[in-house]
Amino acid sequence: MNLQRHVSAIVLFLTCSLLPAFAISGEPASTAGTFTGTITDSTGAVVPGAVVEVHNLMSGFEKTSVSDSNGAFSFLNLGFGHYHLTVKATGFDPFSDDIDISSPVAINRTYALKIAQATTTVTVEADSNDIVNKSAINETDLGTAMSDKLPMISGSTGVSSAITLGSPGITADSNGMFHPLGEHSDTTYSIDGQPVSDQQSKTFSNQISLNSIQSMQVIVGVIPPEYGDKASLVARTTTKSGLGNTHPTGDVSASYGSFGSSTLDASMGIGSSRMGNFTAIDGANSGRYLDTPEFAILHSYGNSEALFNRFDVAPTAADSIHLNLSLSRSWFDVPNQYDQQAAGQDQRSQIFSYNVAPFWTHIVGTTGVLSVNPYMRQDNAHYYPSHDIFSDTPATLAQDRMLRNVGIKVDYSYSKGINNAKFGADFNHTFLNENFSVGVTSPTYNAVCVDSTGTPVVAPGVSSPANCAASGYDPNPNFQPGLLAYDLTRGGQLFSFQGHTDIKEEALYGEDTITVKQWQFLLGVRGDNYNGLSRKYMLEPRVGITYQVKKTGTVLRLGYSRLMPTPYNENLVLSSSTGSGGLAQNVGAFGQHALKPATRNQYNTGFEQGFGKFLILDAEYFWKETKGDYDFDVLLNTPLTFPIQWRKSKIDGFDLRLTMPQTHGVSAYSVMGHARSRFFGPEVGGILFNNPSGITSYEPFRIDHDQNFQQTTNVQYQPKPDLPWYSFTWNYESGMVAGNAPFATDTTTPVSLAYLTPDQQNQIKLTCGAQRATLDAPLTSCAPNLLSSPLLSIPAPGTENPDRNPPRIAPRNLFDMAAGYDNLLRHDRYKLNATFTVTNLTNKLALYNFLSTFSGTHFVAPRGYVAQLKLEF
């Protein structure tokens, strides 16, 4: 019945969305740009057979068109970005130009070629002014030409991996999660213009396949008014299309590697200048689907399947329709610790996702484009406990969560002369259903009594701290009386929760990019109205200014963005609802308040410098203050995470990218970032586990995704197109905050370690002098000067400070490499490519996080090998 309802809803949505478009004889194209033109000679006569190539020097994307009998050429579905164009024709001198695609309004140009002189040799090359980005928006162009040769084992999170490895200011986390510019996961994906701002990591959703994406722009500077909601980072993607593919083109690939991992992917595009279809099918299977809480792999099998289809049709010269359809499923084990594996824990999760997004585009004269994009996407997440719930430790959880987002986005783009403007509206409605049951299964998790060392004990029959002394124990100072009702080891019952809400959001925006000689001004404003469990309306001005110093190949940038970040939707009802049967009080919290939209002021300043055609340096400093910033917490040490809200945050830092376009077969880039993520209590939204009236509740602290510095450097080398290529990546992470790590408050008081389980101590190889903690012999306390861990950076005794010197994950250096041979069979139509990848080359033992309030403990993957064959046609 659920499947029938979903299919019926999709059919009804498509009918309501597409009938009006067909009634106007309209058809949708993507929100990418179109570039057309004519090639002539110096007399104006057309030149057929000229080879026209556009090349994005930053992403490596290339596309070729040949002028027809009328001298005409065209490039459809070009993702926004800066392109270098070259024209070559027999008997004529080569010609070059630069094209900025930043609007769906088509660009049309005529190029007159000069007749070649017999004694003249002309080489067309780009200089520093050709390769720098002159836009007021700081953006990084990513493409398949780059990602195909990155040494990564992406599985079902290829998009996240490409962003993390190729964009500056990104902190990597487990399971495809990343933290942009010091925020938790404040990211909007714009898929052909459709906004998706819900979390896209493996444990929350199934993200779009990298195999479906042609190009991607990552925006980390001034945020254009078109984007709101969650927008510390915007990933603006253009999907692949079958338009213009008069012969079937695509690929079939298969891979196999470590942990029993395998993939099978296929894609194909075919069409004409008026109609096209592109389909991508992806399947992945792995014995290490999720990142694990142990370096050893325990109970971590998973698989995923995804289908993406894009259909384009343009019945008239002025109208086009394109339809994106996607369907995906993932099923995976929840990895175990050693103690959970010994107890027989067998928790699993399953996520179903679908997306339906038709686009109608109408060209208005030669200067305007009207776009209409209704959309509907849904995630259904299911969490299954072990067959014997007492095998789950320390608590058992069952969950069924649904998030459905339905909306429509309408905008009008105008481009003429010095103006490049866009005006639009976005209306969306989010439906949330949350159902779960939870109960304590470990008698020591909420123990009534402790022994003389502070270690929790079972104490059978004791249900009140007042009776501990009679059994020879001490009362547990952390005992939560309200949890007794849900402690299954003491006769309690499962706590059950059912919640539902719907959230309505409306936005109006307008922006104009004005170019005057070397100056460019982005002027815009956005108005957001949020109506959910809380309400807020706000106007958000956005301003960006750039100035190009042509003499030195320099671009200077300055910008300001006012934003209204909105609460995360995942388990928002649980976190915000006060009518949850006394949940907050019973789990030891201090209260519960609905999360509210935040207010953020963000400032950016930076520059981009070109050094001839060989190197581009892009650097930016950012500072932002958010009133009511968000993070996540967990319920009863289970995977049930929910959003919380802190009073404010102040985050500043820098992001930097060095790019070396391909020269003599060598290309390279390096991305870096630093952020100070200072949050200020108390908690003001969600289930409040931190005392809002405590003495230190207003003092700043570093949130657990704060990291001082990270960098990724990739070098690729291919001496000639018909020879093997090589790719090498070096990644350094200084380590995120580990707020639950042990440390000494002074130089004399022993450090109590009883709060850490034997397994948790063993995970971090905790050592006291010469004694190392093991599963069978954990530590109970340690002298301040003897405590150490090779996986953590523990402050010296008496120096810990939540703001200036918190405990952190130990720094790590990871090295990955790949080698490949393209077109092994030397065939023009069918090309067989082979790739071999090694990740974590040195088999580095390292952590992403430790007892994180959001995701717990996760290790970086051990060394892995993958071999892949790909047939392109």
Image (cartoon, rainbow, N blue to C red):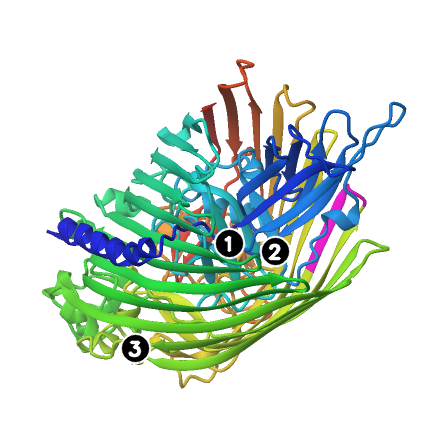
The amino acid pointed to by label 3 is Leu
The residue at which mark 1 appears reads as 236
The residue at which mark 2 appears reads as 139
Q: Position of residue 131 (x, y in %)?
A: 72, 47
**In this rendering, is residue 847 above or below 430?**
above
Which element is circle 1 on? strand
> Residue, x 40% and y 60% (percent of image)?
372
The residue nearer to you, when weighing 312 against 116, is: 116
The magenta segment is 612-619
User: Mark 1: few, some, or many residues within 10 Å (few <14, many ≥20)?
Assistant: many
**In this rendering, is residue 515 above or below 577?**
above
Task: Say whether disc 2 or disc 3 marks the residue closer to the N-terminus.
Answer: 2
Q: Is residue 594 visible?
A: yes
- The reply to whether callout 2 and callout 1 are in contact (CB within 8 Å) is yes
Which element is circle 2 on? strand
Q: Is residue 776 visible?
A: no
Is residue 616 inside the magenta stretch? yes
Residue 492: numbered disc? none
- The reply to whether callout 1 and callout 3 are in contact (CB within 8 Å) is no
